[in-house]
Image (cartoon, helix red, strand yellow):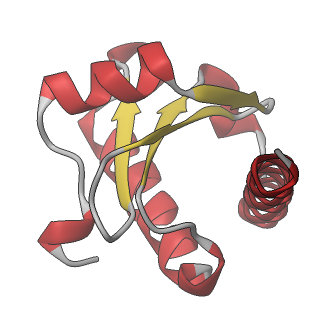
């Protein structure tokens, strides 16, 4: 993932979490908020309760791989913030991948519905 597609600053995380929509899953919560840019960005947050540094880095690598697999499905101008839950460890990689795909589809459908509502006004 290129640097321009990564959310690094705390204020950007806070903005997406406070003002954006969220989508829950067993393994993670995905927040989605506008960023005012012409491209999408991703941020991954994982607490120390999930595991030691090796485990947390492995999970971040897995999430980055999943994110890269679905590059064509993201909306430009949005920040996606992924907060990993402790139950991530009990899920298999394929389950997490499919649940991530389902959540991205939900986001795209809701964005398309909002665009249609705005066009009708």
Residue 92 figure quarter: bottom right
Q: Residue at image x 33%, y 18%?
A: 48
Q: Residue at image x 53%, y 27%?
A: 20
> Front-most of 104 and 27?
104
Residue 37 figure quarter: bottom left
Residue 51 appears in the figure:
no
Which quadrant would the N terminus be assigned to in this image? bottom left
Image vertical order of residue 100 relative to residue 29, above or below: below
Q: Is residue 65 left or right of residue 26?
A: left
Q: Residue furthest front?
A: 121
Image vertical order of residue 28 relative to residue 42, above or below: above
> Front-most of 6 and 46?
6
Residue 87 figure quarter: top right
Residue 104 lies, in percent from the top left, at: 73, 58
Which quadrant would the C terminus be assigned to in this image? top right
Residue 42 lies, in percent from the top left, at: 37, 54
Image vertical order of residue 5 relative to residue 109, above or below: below
Q: Residue at image x 20%, y 78%?
A: 2
Q: Residue at image x 31%, y 70%?
A: 38
Residue 112 lies, in percent from the top left, at: 80, 60
Residue 61 lies, in percent from the top left, at: 38, 63
């Amino acid at each position: 993932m290129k640097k321009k597609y990564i959310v690094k600053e705390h204020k950007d995380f806070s903005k997406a979490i406070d003002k954006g929509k969220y989508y829950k899953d067993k393994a993670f919560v995905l927040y989605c908020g506008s960023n005012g840019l012409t491209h999408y960005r991703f941020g991954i947050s994982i607490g120390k309760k999930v595991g030691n540094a090796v485990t947390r880095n492995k999970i971040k690598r897995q999430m980055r791989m999943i994110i890269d697999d679905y590059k064509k499905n993201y909306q430009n101008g949005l920040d996606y913030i992924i907060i990993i839950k402790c139950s991530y460890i009990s899920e298999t990689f394929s389950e997490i991948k499919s649940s991530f795909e389902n959540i991205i589809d939900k986001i795209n459908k809701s964005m398309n519905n909002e665009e249609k509502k705005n066009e009708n006004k």
